[in-house]
Image (tube, grey):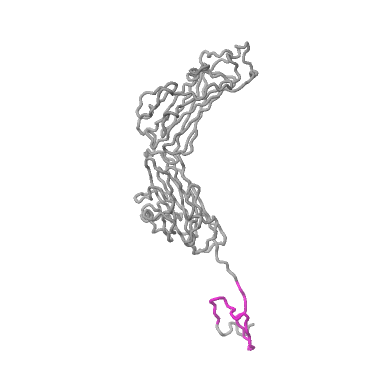
Amino acid sequence: MTCEKRTPGTILEYTLDFQVSDYFAFEDVFVTDTFSDGQRFYNPSGFEPTLSFSEHGNPGISGAQFTTSAVHTPTVGSTNPVVIDFLTIDETEIDGVNDGNGDTTLTFDLSALIDAQNGHDGQLVGGGVPDGGFNNGGSFLNNNPPLSTGFAGTTGTITFYTEVLEEYSDDFPSGDSSVDSEDVLTNEAIIDGRVLNVDNLTAYSPEQREDDDTQEQLSIGSGQLYKSIFAINGVEDSGALSDTNASNGVDGYDSGIDVSPGDEVTYRLTFDLPVSDIENFTLEDFLPIPIYEVNELLSATATDLNSSTADNSVPAVGSIKFGSLHTFPKLAQTTEDLTSEVDNGSTNDGVYIDTASNSFLLDFGDYDAINAPPSVVDILFTVTTQNDPYVDGLLFTNQVQQKQQSTFNETLDKEAIIQINLRQPELDITKGIVAVSSDNTTSFDPTNIAPSGATFDSDPWCYGCF
C-alpha cells in the first residue's frame, strides 16, 4: 500500500503481489480483497484497477484493466454485488447502520482477465513447469526436476485504489462517525485457485484448490507531541521565538539547563495534528516534586486560556496561555465534567489540578469538521522553582502526556519530556580572628574582616583568649 498523507480525502494505492510456486500450476484463479469501513473503492479514469503479469519471465501483460466499461460509484444500501467486466464489487454490508461492518469486498477474476489477453490461456503455470506440462515433453514430474533453459518465475501484481472518507457509515463504536486521527483502516486479501496436474496441465478429479492470504492496515495521521523550555525569568530562548515549525518540535533552552531556586520557568507544550478530527483529547503535565508546586496554577481556568492571545508573550507565574503557533480549531472545554482518576483535585472549567500527582490536565474534548485542515496545539505556562533543600546538580524531569480515544474505543497516548539541572547555593566556611584582648595596639589587615552584613561588639568576644 502506498500513502504519505493518511488523511480523509487521500487516495490510497493498494498493490497485491502474487507468485506461483515453480512446480505448481493453477486455473480458475480469483483474488478477493476486503477493506474496512472508512474507505471506498475508487476507479475514475486514471485509477482503474489493473493487472501486470509475467509467466516464465515473459512480461506479456502490463496494465490490463479489470474495469474498462464503467466507473463505479459507491452506494449505501446496495442489495446485490455489482459486476463490471472482470471485477465484482460487493457493498451489501454498507447499509448506513452503525452495526460494526461496512466492509467492501472486491473479487478480481484473475484467470478470466488473463485469458482475455492475446497469447494467454487463463492458466498460471509455475516457472519450473514447461509449456504444456512435463508430459508434453515425454517426461513426468519427479522429486528433483531440472529447471528448463531460460527459467524464470511466474508473478503478477494487481493495483487498485480506495479513497479515505470523512466519516464511517457503519462501523463507529464510539458513536462519533468521523474518521479521526490514529484510527486504523484494514485490508485483507485471499488468492484462491484450482490446482492443475503439472504433467498435463489438467484439473484433478475431484477438484483440488489452494489459497493464500495477506493483510495490511493503515493508521490515519498521528499527532506529534513535544515539550520545551520557552523562557527563564521572562527571557525567551531566541530559537523558540524564531522557530515556527511544530512538526519536529519547537526550539527552546537546552534540556538539562541550570535552574536555581526562585527562577520562573516557562514551559511549552506543542502537539502537531495532521488530522484535526479527534476524540477525548487531553494534555496532562506532571511537574517534578519538590521543585515545582502545581498549586501555583490553582487559579488557571479554561475561560482565561480560551481568551488568551496566541502569541509569544511570557505568561505570569500560575498562568496558562496559548503560544503563537496555536491553530487548533477548538479550545479547551468549559463544560466537560471528567469523572476519571485525574479529577481528584481542584477543577476550573476544563483545567484540572491534581495535587496528589502534582499535575494539571487540559481537556480539549472532541473535534469534528469536514475537510478540517491540520492544526497545532501550543501551550505556555510558568511555574516557580521552589527553595526546598535538595542536592545540588540533580536533573529533574518534567513530563507531559497526551491522550485520545479512537473511533474504536482504544485509548491512545504519547509522552514527551524535558529536564532541568537544579543548582543549590554552595556553602563556604571561613575561619579567622575578629578581636583580641591584648593591650598592645593591634590592627587587622584587611580592615574589613567580617562577612558583608556582619558586625561585632567593640569588646573582645573571648576576653583573655588569644
Q: Position of residue 12 (x, y in %)?
A: 46, 33
- In the picture, measured across the screen, residue 431 lies left or right of residue 72, that is right
Which residue is at the front of the view, 392 or 380? 380
Q: Position of residue 436 (x, y in %)?
A: 62, 84
The picture quadrant where one finds residue 345 is bottom left
Q: Is residue 433 magenta?
A: yes
Q: 434 above or below 245?
A: below
Which residue is at the front of the view, 387 or 203? 203
- In the picture, measured across the screen, residue 143 lies left or right of residue 274, that is right
Q: Residue at x 48, y 62 (%)?
A: 233
The span shown in magenta is 429-456
Which residue is at the front of the view, 88 or 414? 88
Q: Position of residue 246 (x, y in %)?
A: 47, 49
Q: Is residue 158 magenta?
A: no
Q: 72 above or below 325?
A: above
Q: Position of residue 11 (x, y in %)?
A: 44, 34
Which residue is at the far top? 138
